[in-house]
Amino acid sequence: MPPAMATDGARIYYTQVTGAHGAFMQVSANGGETMPVATPIPFDNFYGIAPHGEMVMGGPPVANYTDGLWLMTMPGGQARRVGDFVVHDASLNNDQTILYYSHAFDLFAANPDGTEPRKLLTANGVPFWMRFSQDGRLLRFSVSDKTNRTSSLWEVRPDGSHLRQLLAGWSYSSNVCCGSWTPDSKYFVFQSWRDGVASLWAIREAGDLWRKVSDEPVLLTQGEMSEEAPLPSLDGKKVFFIGALQRGELARYDAKANVFAPYLSGISAEAVDFSRDGQRIVYVSYPSGIVWQIRIDGSDRRQLTFSPMQAALTRWSPDGSEIAFGAELPGQHSHIYIVPAEGGDPKQLTSGNCDETDPSWSPDGRFIAFACGGTTLLQQAKDGVLRILNVKTQQVTDVPDSVGLYSPRWSPDGRYLLAGTTTVNKVRLYDFTTRNWQDLFTGRWGYPTWSHDSKCVYFSNHWDPKVPVNRICLADRHMEHIVDLITGGELVYGRFGWWTGLAPDDSILELRDTSVQEIYALDVKFP
């Protein structure tokens, strides 16, 4: 979800996200330099301005990526905690008599001080971006459905009655969110994603003697840049929004020079994998989620998948003839596919009732290990399991004692299957000789990768602000620090977090963020 913006007429307030943390910022509504807003405690999220002028803030984070709720006065900056609950988003109604907030799939109402909370409804995802009509009779909000990876717009009466989905029959309705009314409530402006780019749309809310109300949205913006988080100005003459051009730069760590430098001309690529001879690479383009393969010198570039399929985590087959990858279509689970390396139609290999991701070939090319799990850590821990597919017969079997494991990685010598746990932060090894699991290490980890000689495992720690990359070799099980990824610049947060990988010489690869985000003002003349 995009960061929220709000305005008091003279200034625009927003959260600037750096890495995993946010900073509260302000800029003049007429443009100019951005400036931080002094806060008594760190806040990672900004939800909006309450009708009486207090800032509705989230932070510090307290549990499961949710925030404690705070109100902060301006300009003094005094902050007070509201209630003892945690929230995903929050808003006060227009007369400041009711606090609305969401947690998990539920939308709650409470007194303005957080007392007497009561559940109004349960959505099919996480409710966020709550906005009231001028007369206070309608509350509209967005719902993020992580299972199907969609978002939708909904409205409800303040008492929780008359819940209905907006734009249910609209052709672009599977990924809409973040709507706000114009000050006169005649128009509702929102964003819709298509092919990885967000555009702004408006719905006419009220008719007059000469005009009938039309439910068909009207396009306000269009182009390569994503326009997100629409915010109508208080005079109704402008719509502020965040314009984003998302791009990454592939970089490689030079251990001798101790620097990160652009690799393969700095292509915007994650999930990079190399053919066994090291002459060709396959990758997923960021942010479009398309699979490509090229020669190591950058020539002979070939597109292997097409929108609306969104791909992730590519793996080259040992003989170099095929590429396995996980991918999803809108509103469906992710499944494992293979596609000829020279191009052709992708073939779906799995069809389980789960998200099937992270394919890993056996060294002989006969089998593919993959993870079958949910979209959250809790679902993965409860229902997730590792499976092995026989590529020739299409038979699928579960890896013994693999419940709660994900990110399978077959060792190049074929002896081990490496995987991580979702709840106790362990990386484990399944020995195909003894058919037993053993712990490799306990601690935070991400994107585990075998060295090409099968002797060591590299992994990153995304929970450390420096995002260190460490190595453990099987001979002594000693953890060795290699480099902090943050020294190469801010990292792209891709499909599965901050991607890291290895080049053929086992040097570290990362995708650093070269995206541009700016606040724009769109002059509009609503009829």
Image (cartoon, rainbow, N blue to C red):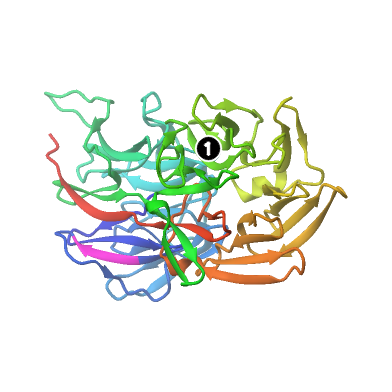
Is 431 on the left or on the right of 30, as rendered?
right
Choose top left, top right, bottom left or bottom right for residue 348: top right
Image quadrant occupied by the C terminus: top left
The percent position of residue 44, horizontal first and vertical second, equals 43, 64
Pick the front one: 108 or 308: 308
Residue drawn at 14 percent across, 42 percent down: 524
The percent position of residue 263, horizontal first and vertical second, equals 43, 56
Residue drawn at 68 percent across, 48 percent down: 409
The percent position of residue 161, horizontal first and vertical second, equals 45, 36
Is 45 on the left or on the right of 274, as rendered?
left
Give the dominant element type of the magenta stretch: helix, strand or loop: strand
Question: What stretch of residues is rendered in magenta?
Answer: 24-28
Choose top left, top right, bottom left or bottom right for residue 327: top right
The percent position of residue 75, horizontal first and vertical second, equals 27, 73
Element assignment for label 1: loop
Extreme residue toward the right, this view: 434
Q: Amino acid at mark 1?
A: Asn
Q: Compared with residue 393, is residue 404 higher up or lower down, i.e. above or below?
A: below
